[in-house]
Image (tube, rainbow, N blue to C red):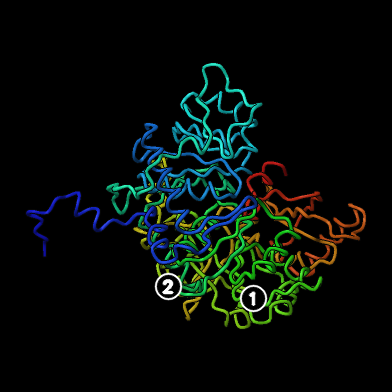
Amino acid sequence: MRLDLTGIDPVDHALARRCSVGDIPTRAAATFSGRTAVSDDTGSWTYAELEAIANRFAHGLVAHGIEEEEPVAILSTNCREFVATYFGTAKAGMVSLPINLLSGLDNITHALTDSGTRILVVHGSLAELVMGAVAAIPAIRTVVVIGGVPDSLEAPAGGPAVLGWDDLLAGDDSNPDTVIADRQIVQCLYSSGTTSRPKGVLTSHLAVTMAGLSNGAVFGLAWGAQASITVLPLPLFHTAALNGVLVPGITMGATVHLLPGFEPVTYVDTVARVRATHLVALPLMLEALAEGADRGLDLSSVEVALYAMAQMPEQVRRRLETAMPDAKIVLGSGMSECTPATVMQWPELGSTKPDSWGYPTPVAENRICEPGGDELLPPDTDGEIAYRGPTVMEGYWNNPEANAGVFAGGHLHSGDLGRIDPEGVVWFADRVKDIVKSGGENVSSLHVEQVLLDHPHVAEVACVGRPDPKWGELVIAVVVPAEGAPAEEHLKASVMEFGAERLSHSHRPRDVVVVDAIPRTATGKIRKVELRAMH
């Protein structure tokens, strides 16, 4: 069947069917007008206020000469203006480009240069640091400072114009009638670069909208008279916070309390004070909740505690279950390229299959294929996890070679190794690039790490391969000592002996490197590319 569009104005037809991320706060404001949408350490906005301010920012971008599908970079800690910039950019048909503050100056410069960004929105606390770097990126012609331009800030001669964030707000607070295609790009997130140079992940309005609905459903966010409440210390420049918490929260009319970062006491006190119902955090953040309960804080309001990026140690889970006896504690996982979450545990799996990743979410088909290939493998067979569904990215920006490989066989190749058991539960084994190939054996660095974490004097551990002319690679354990650990040489010998007793010949570590800290991304992923370069 083909629709006859005779007599229909194409613009009217497109607007009536528009799938725009910018319309998410519009719909929420129509239902939850006076409810608090977002708050930070400077104040709060209702849904009506968020909608009006995001609309004014969208009109301001257009008036400033920024074109549709052009990137608008955001270099900021969590704040209300970050949220309004993101939704305002979407309303104007432009592309939000949140920049990872923790990725290092080289990667920040790479993202701003590679993307061709002309306008940069920066938090006032970072403005002076940023101006020097901006001077080396001629394409940036406008810097917009959240909180106003500091008196001490001087733009370099011949450099970009500097405006206050409020200066860009237009008087028009109506939702723009921007024609937006479903698969038009709404955001570009540069990958964390755990295995290679960060790549710009281009995601569509449809993908973000679908992920918001799916995550809201599987997260159990309420839609009705009683708002769900969350506290968000995870950085909005990362997909876990942006697409896993903020967008679903605004979609469902939740109240999102933003923190500029993770500070244990502030986080736990805020959770207790606002009576948070739904939390997404790293295991170390949830561990802080258990410590807060020990201080006598009432955390009984928490209904769901979703943790991400790493398995939770069993002793931490037990403490949390005591601190929040009515809360469902579940693991959610995914990747920027598939607008997470792609898998999530059911609470029942916490006792039967606690080490699994859980079931595929409603919008993500999970399959196992030959690593890097297009052959799909049968159930309970080890291979590469691949995805298909509406939340899959459009592709990598300016990287045709990477695109050709990642979409091979009609699925998105994740780079994660694992299997799907006969009941449909997904199990993660390791990153493809983190497998250590020693003596003809594929060694899971994750398995070695899980074993060595049981050593009483090991607080953290990461395993990588070191090139070896005889064995191909040798397993190297990089460890952070626990409190009370013996001197370095004794600790090394003890870890080596511990591994030899519990691991097969090919898996046991052949060297131990003791460090003060293991390099990680903003969401806790280990930067193994750095470890391999160092060790």
Asked if residue 374 can be seen in this view, the reply is no
Outermost residue, top direction? 157
Q: Nearer the viewer, mark 2 or mark 1?
A: 1
- Looking at the image, residue 232 lies above or below residue 360: above
Give the crowd class for mark 2: few <14, some 14-19, many >=20 residues within 10 Å.
some
Residue nearer the viewer, 100 or 157: 157
Quadrant assignment, res 430: bottom right
Mark 2 secondary-structure assignment:
loop
Residue nearer the viewer, 266 or 402: 266
Q: CA distance from mark 2 to mark 1?
A: 43 Å
Q: How many marks?
A: 2
Q: Residue at x 11, y 61 (%)?
A: 2
Amino acid marked by disc 2: Pro
Amino acid marked by disc 1: Ser
Asked if residue 535 can be seen in this view, the reply is yes
Instruction: Find residue 463 and report its horizontal and vertical position in percent.
Output: 70, 55
Instruction: Find residue 135 and report its horizontal and vertical position in percent.
Output: 56, 23
Instruction: Find residue 474 and report its horizontal and vertical position in percent.
Output: 70, 52
Disc number at residue 378?
A: 2
Of the 4 image quadrants, the one containing the C terminus is top right
Q: Residue at x 46, y 33 (%)?
A: 119
Quadrant assignment, res 312: bottom right
Give the crowd class for mark 1: few <14, some 14-19, many >=20 residues within 10 Å.
some
In screen coordinates, is 388 left or right of 132? Answer: left
In screen coordinates, is 253 left or right of 132? Answer: left
Dot 2 or dot 1, earlier in sequence:
1
Mark 1 secondary-structure assignment:
loop
The residue where tag 1 is placed is: 301
